[in-house]
Amino acid sequence: MATAALLVTTAIALGGAAGVREGSLSGRYAYAQNALSAVRADKNALSRAGDLGTSTKDPTTAADRAAAASYVERERRLADPKLTSVRVTQPRAARPQDRYAMAGGCYSLAGTPIFFKPTDLGDYLLYDAARKFVIADGKRASAPGRTTVWTARKSGNRFTFTNNGSPLTIGGASAFALTRTTGCAAYPESQIDVSGRPHAGVTPYQEVRGYVDAHTHGMAFEFLGGAAHCGKPWAAYGAPYALVDCPDHTATGGYGGVLESMLSGQPNHDPVGWPTFKDWPAPESLTHEGTYYRWLERAWRGGQRIFVNLLVENNKLCQVYPLKKGLEYAKCDDMESVRRQAQDMREMQDYIDAQSGGPGKGFYRIVTSPYQARKVINAGKLAVVTGMETSVPFGCTVKLDIPQCDIGDIDTQLDQLKRLGLRQVELVNKFDNALSGVAGDNGAVGTAVNAANFLETGSFWDMRHCEPADGESHDRDQVALPSTSGQEISAQQQDALFGAVGQLFDTLHTALPLYGPAHHCNSRGLTTLGEHTIAGLAKRHLIFDPDHMSAKARASALDQIDDLGYHGVVSSHSWSTPDSYPRIYREGGFITPYAGDSTGFVEKWRTHIGWADKRYYWGIGYGADMNGLGAQGDPRGTDVANPVTYPFKGLGGVTVDKQHAGERVYDINADGVAQYGLYPDWIQDLTKVADTQKRGDGAKIEDDMARGAEAYLQMWERAEGVAPDSCRNPGLRKRVAQVSRLVRRGMTTTAVMKAVGQPYTRLGSTYGFCARTSTDPKVMMKATFSKAGRVTGVRRT
């Protein structure tokens, strides 16, 4: 979640928060422009958690980086898993086989062609050729509503339809034989424009291929009181009702969207979404929905196979933002919002299932283990992992250095959240809390977030000067005194430095902090409650994300992870520091740099290759941070020498063309990552950029990205207690006879891994392992499995 501090200034502009002065529009807008510059400046940075300076210590040497790059080259030469393809939806029969099968189909109902648009599992809008909706007695309505939704039931070869318990009758009949026909009007919906069947595995347990996004906020329409984000990822009546602007934007013709203006840098925007999409979605339009389910479907069709949906909230900014969706949202409780969003995920899964022909048939599959995720991906679907990024997790805020939670609170809520499906967790976001210090934000944004930190905790960030010689990576540099001479800053300078906050909050009856010269480190590190939380995550096999922690806290956290021997670590969106990234790889963790612009990401990819650890499978993904107020990738332009050309071939051989949404046609060259459906196009753009920089690197980055889903799953397996593979880790090799005893006929693939560790190869129906004898330190062994994933034999090869 990026630059949430801007919400504070938005509340000021709207005049909706107690104790906040209005200020001049020009002054607020100038401040917004400065803040916007800070937002955009860091989206391509290797580390968004701190400026790269002499105090940032990347511990790797040139020799280390060369050895890592050589290892990655060897990884790319390994045999790829054999892939097959699957249908997007089930075949459509002449007569529907059950009450879900009419989804998206054209059927004759009492002799009239009717398009069946699902609103939920088994519920439909009955849409006729004149673009009207069937209501009671076969009459018509011009718009969908409560009276137009019909629940289908199948009895023998006929179907009945009820609305609020009342049956549909047409010409005296209330049971209907449905037959496929033509002549229907298509219901308005965003297109996919990817042809070809999605790729899948030949077995449910083999190595996977696919892209991974480890950081996006798919349910952000609920956060900050439910009124700051415009649109939803789905709506019962489809795109025309999901992809709409916020009421405060619409009522003013696009001039009332102050938060949108501050984040985008544009004073106003066209409030019309569907079907024109003139001004949004766009890379710089951060308050509008970017993960509409059809756009997410396009990303899946284009090759994405893991989507980590982070449930997101910030209670203080929710309190400050003046608009609320309802009374239940006014509490601004982080954990209530998290639970609400988790329920939303299940409802969205049901909705997508409804569009796809019934329970379990949609592409969007919520998973809770790496084994379930592997099965989902090899079935050709998208594995959706639930995560959390909040400022006050488990209610663990701090007030004047007094924690507002205890160990019991943390343990109780960790157990509850795991039962809810949570699997990936950040301990801190924008403010210090009872678990950890925060990295902070810099520049004008930093002053505003720091003020909000004061409102939340009663304290400003305790940022102190870091000496380069101490070897500690620094946090976000704050606006600093011009020297360490001890001279007091003038009133005029103070206005320039802190006027953005000092003039806006009359509740801050305290001196604003004056920091020494850069670089800065938050003195607040990992607390004992934070240590307990990390231990609790490891005990429950939950994935720990150290992003947004202060450098001091993150270093302590990784020390603890090392002591625990725990592998479940992910840095999801470049909010760690370069001293941490090699450590995370050494722990057997996984990293997805912030996506940003394609040119910036290619540079990050090159750097991360130099940190790869030869003990673990190599792959990389991205953290989009879409819907989290994170800036998306800008277009490189239509006049560059190496643009993306449409159509192009995507992962698994699918054909990707320009996407249509209503009247809008998207082109990555001109539009950038305007919405989530453009990520396959962005990955294609990566290959263009990489190839231009060094011939042949386009294929390499494409391969590394396609290996990302497997790398994430292998990290997750290790978090579950499975030992790393014995080929890359010679010290873990068992004797041949021992492997033969441990791997028995009838064992599942999971049981085999828990017995002898991760396989080195997972090709088709075989797993390959390394073992040893008294005379041979490396003996290859192969376990063979049945179609159901049970051991049929093990032998030396």
Image (tube, rainbow, N blue to C red):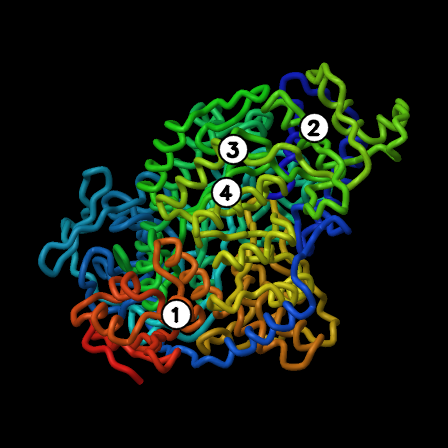
User: What is the quadrant of residue 721 in the picture?
Assistant: bottom left
Q: Earlier in the sequence, mark 3 or mark 2?
A: 2
Between the C-alphas of marks 1 and 2, the distance is 59 Å
Q: Which residue is mark 2?
A: 13
> Residue at 77% across / 51% down in the picture?
54
Q: Which of the labelled discs sits on residue 435, or is there none? A: 3
The residue carrying mark 1 is 726
Q: Could you tell me if the residues under marks 1 and 2 are in contact, i.e. CB atoms within 8 Å?
A: no
Q: Amino acid at mark 2?
A: Ala
* Residue at mark 4: 426
Percent position (x, y) of residue 536? 39, 39
Q: Quadrant of residue 100?
A: bottom left
Three-letter amino acid code at disc 4? Glu
Which mark lies nearer to you, 1 or 2? 1
Q: Residue furthest bottom?
A: 797
**Image location of residue 256, percent across then percent down:** 65, 34
